[in-house]
Image (spheres, grey):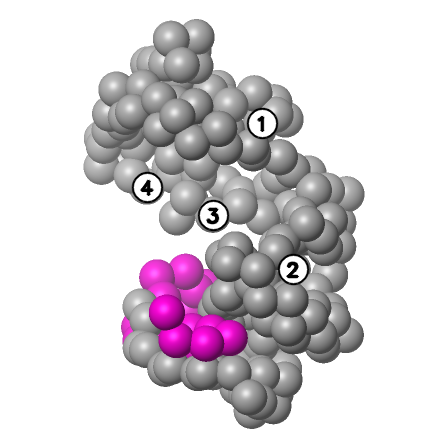
Amino acid sequence: PEHVKGMLLECLDRNSEEFYQSMRSQMSNPSVFLYVMRAAFSSMYRENLKGEFNVPWRKQDFDVNGKRISFDVNQLDICSSYLQAKNAEIFVADWMVAVQDAKAGDLVYFDPPYDPLSDTSSFTAYTAGRFGKAEQRALADHARLLRDRGAFVMLSNNDTPFVRGLYAGFEIEVAPCGRSINSKATGRGKIAEVIITSRRA
């Protein structure tokens, strides 16, 4: 954590549009990843069709309003100690691979690209690989397999008839959630989202 903290503080001190652009291609470095996600517009992760991170810098916040990024680097020590004490393993993999060893009693949470509210109103291409209706169906099938294995499954999505149909037999709770990311101001505000669970905790 000391190395991560040192590099992160240097990135925060050097925050500028030019520096940000140069760092976007180095996000495999944990310090750079933390910096870029704090400096990116709405802290959003999105890729273009080539798989390149392409979220713009928060120019309005930094250049126009003079804001600075606040980050309590000491929290990294707390996180590091906790993960070591729990012997936790963190890895990057396709979602099917990530949950292949899930067993009875485990908690599996999925946060997929959301099902569009309409053909034109929602954006689901956050990575180079698309996540459409077929992928949503595969996720629902996998959620059932994990549930039948005894794992506790939880996921979020937009409240659409398609999603409700996919998860028939699951517990579905609706909550209005604020949306701050939209090209049109009228598209921001409260949107109904669902939390889907395989059984009540």
Q: Is residue 122 above or below residue 174?
A: above
**Where residue 36 sits in the image (x, y, percent)?**
46, 30
Q: Is disc 4 placed on a helix, strand or loop?
A: helix
Residue lying at 45% horizontally and 83% vertically, measured from the top left: 171
Give the label on residue 44, or none: 3
Range of magenta residues? 179-201
Q: Is disc 3 placed on a helix, strand or loop?
A: loop
Q: Given this view, does label 1 or label 4 mark the residue nearer the observer? A: 1
- Residue for badge 2: 125
How far apart in space, not on screen, are marks 1 and 3 (Cα)? 13 Å
**Where residue 169 sits in the image (x, y, percent)?**
55, 88
How far apart in space, not on screen, are marks 4 and 3 (Cα)? 15 Å
Residue 186 seen in the current view = no
Q: Badge 3: how crowded within 10 Å, few (<14), some, or many (20+)?
A: some
How far apart in space, not on screen, are marks 1 and 2 (Cα)? 19 Å
| Residue 180 counted in the magenta span | yes
**Sequence-wise, which precedes: disc 1 or disc 4?**
1
Three-letter code, disc 3: Met
Give the label on residue 27, or none: 1
Give the label on residue 60, or none: 4
| Residue 78 counted in the magenta span | no
How far apart in space, not on screen, are marks 2 and 4 (Cα)? 24 Å
Q: Quadrant of the C terminus?
A: bottom left
For the residues labelled 4 and 3, say whether their Cβ atoms are less than 8 Å apart. Answer: no
